[in-house]
Amino acid sequence: MDERLLLEILQKDARISEKDLAKMLRSSESEVKKKIDELKKRGIIKAFRAYIDWEKRGEDYITAYIEVKVTPQARTGFSEFGEMLAANPKVEEVCVTSGEYDFTIKITAKDIRDVSNFVTETLAPKKEVTGTMTHFVMKKFKENGVVLTDAAKAKKLVISA
Amino acid sequence: MIAKRVRAVPPSGIRKYFDMASREKDIVTLGVGEPDFDTPYNIKERAMEAIELNCTHYTSNAGLLELRERICQKLRVENAINVSPDEVIITSGSSEGLDIALRTVLDPGDEVLVQDPAYVAYGPLISLAGGKPVFVPTVEEKDFRLQPDDMRKKITKKTKAILYCSPNNPTGSVLSKDDVKGIAELAIENDLYVISDEIYERLIYDGDHYSIGSFKGMANRTITLNGFSKAYASTGWRVGYAAAKGELVEGMYKIHQYCMLCAPTPSQYAMLTAFDEEASVRQMLKMYNARRRLLVKGLNEIPGIKCHMPKGAFYAFPNITGTHLSSEKFAEKLIKEAKVAVVPGSVFGPSGEGFVRCSYSVSTESIIEALERMRKLFS
């Protein structure tokens, strides 16, 4: 079975049935199921989740990218701080990045006050944090590989020779 | 009154279904003849750069020399066809190449052997060039492969050329090496030109592609047509090419310089990067192959439908005679009652009756949805 192709198909549409996957990959349903379980176990498939536009549903929230300057700790370096941030449900992404700041994190919160609280009460008091820079997201065009604007869809013919 | 030869050309059979599908909402389409993938980004970027640098004027009539050199290299390495840049014309899509090839070769009344079913433009373009299409039926039992023995029966004193396309639209058939060898022998025996439409060349899942122009004794009687539309998901850029020797290429060049001047300049620059897009092509090919199996196996699960496994292009050509509907009635019913668009096989020629063309160059999601709707309609 072409593992790479299986992953490409699932990345586009995780809900595709094992029966259809078996046809596409010239395999059997049970083989596909086994392969997917294996990929989960190996930690290659991390999650199967719906990608939701909450804003479209009328739910207000705010996204911010926060750059954080951190003093590396003895023995653990950045990892302890990174893992602590990752455990916070408000935090969507945590990366160590190059440049003036050490971490870039992405958080989703209720409103500006919620973000402020996170920065002033969660981040700032940490002894290793020496500075932050917060960027509020004003408009999103693409997220997680999904284009969010409708305008990008080119009109194609329905029937052509 | 407009010209008789134009009036004599029937309107495209596809139009009716296009209009029918356009009236319906929520159509899932298997009716398209182009890739659903986006043009690889590097190709687009090269075009933007060309526009910014004012590469927006005519090129030489034959097209950018650098692009013709890349094409020559490709033809030599991949197709075993040896031509110089002077023997290549960059055309506005391979459609233009087809038109100027026919106009170069045909005198009034000359006959052209064409496989049936075939791309809808072949017959009309032959007629407009003053020739007469003579259709050679191909059958499901032989995977719709054009057979030299069937062609031989249709040869008359007026036969001037053979026109075929492998992999084929709409059947997805791919000619074997022996098939091509047989056609080459037939052409030499009867002193015929061959116009080889190789636009789907890169889209083969089982087997290999053989360019007839590379066969012994064929170089001086073959016009090889190809382009970037299908392999590089670039149908709207309008860049194709024609390769031929001697008076064939000189004739085509004459028509091209008067009717087209040159292919779109930014598009020509864009395609300079196409040859570096091997990885994108291979990735698309893998996905088409997976979708091909999904569609063909799914079609075979629907009562009344029987589908052979096509070897190339991106079309399945299922036999629908088990539904007791004609191709046209089947397509009409499908659009109106299941909101699925397919193209009746009969628009591609009389041998297409009893079949419909279903494209798998659409998203996996569309294929699954279309199959589900068809299952509901026929179960």
Image (cartoon, grey):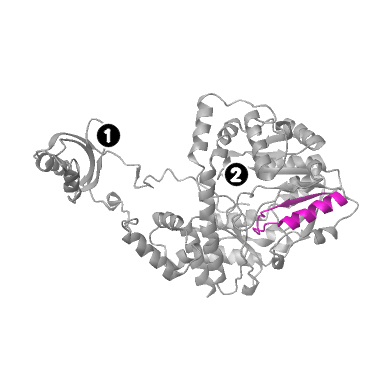
Kindly indicate the quadrant of the structure image that contains residue B146. Answer: bottom right
Q: Whole-Å distance between the Cαs marked 1 and 2? A: 41 Å
- In screen coordinates, is B296 left or right of B166? left
- In screen coordinates, is B277 left or right of B88? left
Amino acid on which disc 1 is placed = Ser
Residue at mark 1: chain: A
Q: Position of residue B58 (x, y in %)?
A: 64, 26
Of residues B236 and B197, the one drawn nearer to the viewer in this rendering: B197
Residue at mark 2: chain: B
Q: Is residue B20 above or below residue B330?
A: above
Q: Position of residue B222 (x, y in %)?
A: 78, 44
Res. B37 mark: none
Kindly indicate the quadrant of the structure image that contains residue A159. Answer: bottom right
Q: Position of residue B14 (x, y in %)?
A: 64, 55
- Give the residue displayed 16% in from the left and 47% down from the top: A84
- Give the residue displayed 52% in from the left and 54% down from the top: B286
Res. A98 mark: 1
**Residues in magenta?**
B161-189
Q: Is residue A115 magenta?
A: no
Amino acid on which disc 2 is placed = Ser
